[in-house]
Amino acid sequence: MSELAENREVVFHASGVTKVYQMGEVQVHALRGIDLDLYAGELVVLLGPSGSGKSTLLNILGGLDTATSGHVSYHGRDLTRAGDRELTEYRRYHVGFVFQFYNLIPSLTARENVAAVTEIARRPMAPERALEVVGLGHRLDHFPSQLSGGEQQRIAIARAIAKNPEVLLCDEPTGALDSATGIVVLEALERVNRELGTTTVLITHNAGIAEMADRVIHLADGSISDMHVNTVKRAARELSW
Amino acid sequence: MRALDKKVLRELWQMRGQALAIIAVIVSGVTTMVMFLSTYDSLIQTRENYYAENRFAEVFASLKRAPEHLLARIQLIPGVERAESRVVAAVNLDIEGFNEPVIGKLISLPDAGDARLNQLHLRRGRFIEPYRDDEVMLSEAFANAHRLQPGDHLSVIIKGKRKTLTIVGIVLSPEYVYQIAPGAFFPDFKRYGVMWMGRNGLASAYDMDGAFNDISLTLGSGAAVGTILDQLDDLLKPYGGYGAYAREDQFSHRFLSEEVRQLRTMATVFPLIFIGVAAFLLNVVLNRLINTQREQIAILKAFGYSNAAIGLHFVKLVLLIVLLGITIGVALGGYWGRELSLIYMEFYRFPYLHYLLRPSVVVVAATVTVLAAISGTLLAVRQAARLSPAEGMRPNSPVVYRASLIERLGLQRFFSQPTRMIVRHIQRRPFKSLLSVIGIALAGGIMMVGNFQEDAIRYMVEVQFSISKRDDLSVRFTDPTSRRALHELQAIPGVQHVEVFRTLPVRLRFEHRTYRTALEGVQPEGELMRVLDTRLQPVALPPQGVVLTDHLAKILGVLPGDMLTIEVLEESQPVLQVPVVGLSKQYLGVWGYMRIDALNRVMGEGEVISGAYLAVDPQARGEIYAQLKEMPRVAGIVVRKSAIQSFYDTMAETVLFFSFIANLLGATIAVGVVYNTARIALSERGRELASLRVLGFTHGEIAYILLGELVLLTLVAIPLGFLVGEGLCAFLASQFKTDLYRVPLVLESQTYANAAAVVLFSACASGAVIWHRLGRIDLVSALKTRE
């Protein structure tokens, strides 16, 4: 498996990444020196309890936040030095996000939520097509308030993949869902990863989900505590928790 | 349409109540601006056209009497384009069915050919036939006041001789757009009429055959008006010239210009207030919106929307509200502008109206509004644009509250917990609370302006006609007369008291400044005409020297103790040096006063009078009028009380209109501010209030927490509104200070009460809407949504 990894193209390269927050009068060390390579097309699960620094790492990879020190590059492009404009451009053309609370725009329908992203993308798929990929081709004109949590999260996934991003970053995508609905959402992510070859990073504190990953990275207290390659990768619908 | 634009539209629809309140404020601002500015332009344009088409003269002079051949010499003054001589006669009139004295001015028209200057605009009937001496044309205002029609007859007393004339036409004149009897302060169309008849007929009745006593000129372009006035004065001096004056000193024109200038002031002050308030409201609403949309902004940024795109998104929302407001405002302003122009047109009796809504007015109104709105929301938009996506994703940290003044003073046991919540909430954002208070205060202030007009006018009239001039009627003689006429007047049955006066047309000069007015010699310690000092107390005039209206002293730059040069424009036209011995307060007109004996003495003329003030037995009025009218020397009789009454009657409608508009506008602001403040408080604290409901608080108790704050802000705003109102009125009063009139800063307690009442009512109406919404608060979902 390591052989496979070495033959693949490196998408993200992180070395010595730290992140320190100032919270009132306390300094919070969210990340304490992370070294990590992520490869094209793999599905990685970042596993760890809350407060372990998973979201911080994901935000830095996605250009939502910048590291306090250390280095992050995307296809050799230095993200740590990038300015606001460059990060915006990076997010616009390369990254898709999925969040725990879906974060749909309530005043826009399913189709329009996706369109809000495809309108500014370079070679997007049609919003309808993206919604079909997540199995919601029949709920195009519903507002978020008319949809269940699982449906909302699948729209969020459609929104994230509609621009054909190279990487898909998912922060606890099933965190707010029951397990049956969660599995439907994970199936959608799995399908995107398999069919479109999108490099996917998925954060969770739920060890059960780790079994669908190519690789599992454990985070604890801002550091990588363990990293292993799944010898048997299970399909999402076989998972349970 | 792009997805984000749909978001703008849908969110605007969601916040339609608040948006509507803001739009109403913007509409008020743009409407008043467009209305006043377009009316201003229309009046100027209409007046210019009217003047040009009817050849309104540029220089005027009246004199005692000059032979007609002098006209040729006047025509030769360099720069004079046209000159036209006229006979103008002050007359008394008898109108059937109207027993009070009516005075008039008869003006000659050339018998051969049309008038070259100051041409009349025929409304009904026809012009006078050449050389007819029994035909007359009336000004429309006068004719309408008495329902006189072509074909009716009119009895005119010219120099004591009665003459019956047939009305042939009803006309308008550019010279008498504003028609006020000499010495009066407001139009009274029933008791003062301007009329025209053929030159020959009038001249023979007025002993002016082959002569004239009035002249009008137009000038070539680039002519030096000052020099021409001097040359004309020199020519007329031997013939008893009363001093030439240019168009800008022509009475009707001056009044009109003054009114038009006021429109301009209104067009600036009111819209600025509204647009300022609208900018503030937009700021408050947008700040709140951006706060509730932190996550949405973050998500859009996570997907690659740029700062500029996010900023533009919110700017679009603001622009949509503003543009809606501007569009409606321009439409309404155009409509009301035309209506207001029509009111002015009727009031001034312009023959027509050139309504003019210049594109530049619309552009200015739109630009000012958009700029104000953008600058009012710039910070909020910037905050949205700059929000870092990672930060936006995190929930807002709990709002920081501090112990309020109540706790720091250790007074908490006197206040309930909800009351302390109110105080803490206000204290947490003092600046925002202050702006809300200022907004409501402006609403109160605007309403006070609406009523200030009426208060001020009533006060001016009160001072002029109850404290200063207290006669029942005044009589003016055609020529200066011996004091013996006093006895004749006293002898009329029913006349209780008579005081004489002497008036002289003068030009006052101090250093290089001059002013044309009248000097009045009054009886010392008189009861019917009292000169007031600057504290409005009647003063005894010193045995010598002149007392000037304080505003006149300011115009001339003269102080008590200075020596004033008085060029008398009557009789032998002597030039006198008289010391200024005091100042007098007066709101209407500017005059100089002397004791009549002192004036007679410096004129070296013996005991001469120009007229008399009379106190009469009300029962005997009719008889007295009849007798006075037949006295040959009586040029005019003015009845004070009926003049005041007719003034109030004409004023009432306009004042009512303006105070209605001001109250409506004020209420718009009050509702806009209170409603928006309340809605935002509800949105910010809905969760908190729902939690309290869950804990067992009643609808009334949570409403108290929210509405109590508004009540407190409103109560603070009302006294502040009084100050704002006083300030605005003081500003307007300072703008309306001219030699024609000075508007005093007088505000009746009713004006304060009215402003407070409308503010309270608007606040209560907004409160009722919030109360209703609080009743529908969804406890479960309010607790679920995360902030």
Image (cartoon, grey):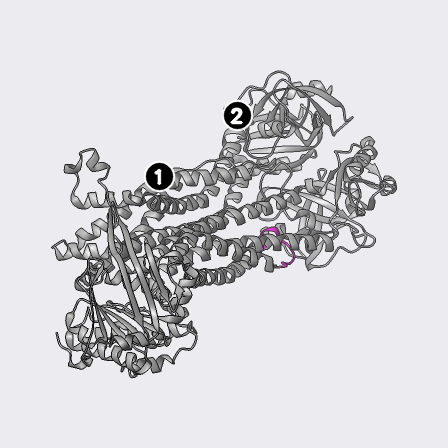
Tell which subunit mark 2 falls on. B
Against B633, is B30 above or below? below
Question: Can the viewer see residue A91 in this picture?
Answer: yes
Quadrant of the drawing holding the N terminus of chain B? bottom left
Distance, label 1 to label 2, CA atoms, is 30 Å
Q: Position of residue A42 (x, y in %)?
A: 28, 75
Three-letter code for the amino acid on which mark 1 is drawn = Pro
A56 on left or right of A84: left
Question: How many numbered marks, from 0 up?
Answer: 2
| Mark 2 nearby-residue class (10 Å; few <14, some 14–19, many ≥20) | some
Q: Give the residue at mark 2.
A: B534
> What is the magenta range?
B346-354
Q: Taken as a whole, is the magenta stretch helix, strand or loop?
A: loop
Q: Which mark is residue B206?
A: none
Looking at marks 1 and 2 on the same chain, the residue that comes earlier in the sequence is marked by 2
Question: Can the viewer see residue B190 in this picture?
Answer: no
Three-letter code for the amino acid on which mark 2 is drawn = Thr
